Image (cartoon, helix red, strand yellow):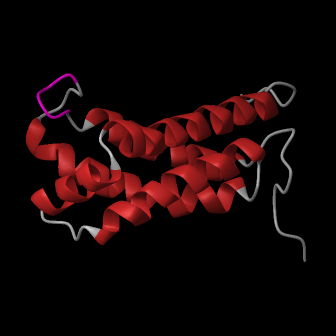
Amino acid sequence: MIDSRTAPFAALLLRLGLGALFIAHGLLKVFVFTIPGTVAYFESIGYPGVLAYAVIAAELIGGTMLILGIAPRVVAVALIPLMIGATLQHIPNGWLFSSPKGGWEFPAFWTVLLVVQALLGSGPYALLPKRRG
């Protein structure tokens, strides 16, 4: 049974955690791997280099929108394909993310968390939890 008194705060914590992770991963690509390095990596795995810019933007903008609570259900659903792509890229590396080049369990779990966020909704303290009308 779901505790209706605490469930909204679980949704809030999930939203904040997901947002922080997306921002951290976007900033990792900008400041650690660098944008040119991220572009080169995407090209090395067969993705178009321009996709790196879209992924960085999606992580930074999507993460910020999740933290602020701006259409979090829509944002969570929009980020699912990004995480499916990351999962597919990591499958050849094996199960655990501690494997060389990282395994696929972390992005797969992250995908599941996005689905959960989309199902739960925004939780409290969201600026624009849903569209009106």
Of 130 and 32, nearer the camera is 32
Using the rendered view, name the quadrant where residue 11 is placed. Answer: top right
* 4 sits left or right of 76 in the view: right
Image location (x, y in percent) of residue 53: 39, 63
Q: Is residue 21 above or below residue 127?
A: above
At 20% across and 34% down in the image, what residue appears?
Answer: 103
> Can you name the residue that lies furthest to the bottom here?
133
At 27% across and 55% down in the image, what residue appears?
Answer: 36
Q: Is residue 20 above or below residue 89?
A: above
At 84% across and 31% down in the image, what residue appears?
Answer: 4
* 9 sits left or right of 54 in the view: right
> Can you name the residue that lies furthest to the right here?
133
Q: Is residue 84 visible?
A: yes
Question: Which corner quadrant holds the N terminus?
Answer: top right
Q: Is residue 9 above or below residue 40?
A: above
Of 88 and 27, nearer the camera is 27
Image location (x, y in percent) of residue 97: 24, 28
At 50% across and 59% down in the image, what residue appears?
Answer: 57
Of 15 and 26, nearer the camera is 26
The answer to whether residue 31 is magenta is no
Using the rendered view, name the quadrant where residue 9 is placed. Answer: top right
Residue stretch rendered in magenta on the structure: 98-102
Image location (x, y in percent) of residue 118: 63, 52
Image location (x, y in percent) of residue 60: 55, 50
Majority SS type along the magenta span: loop
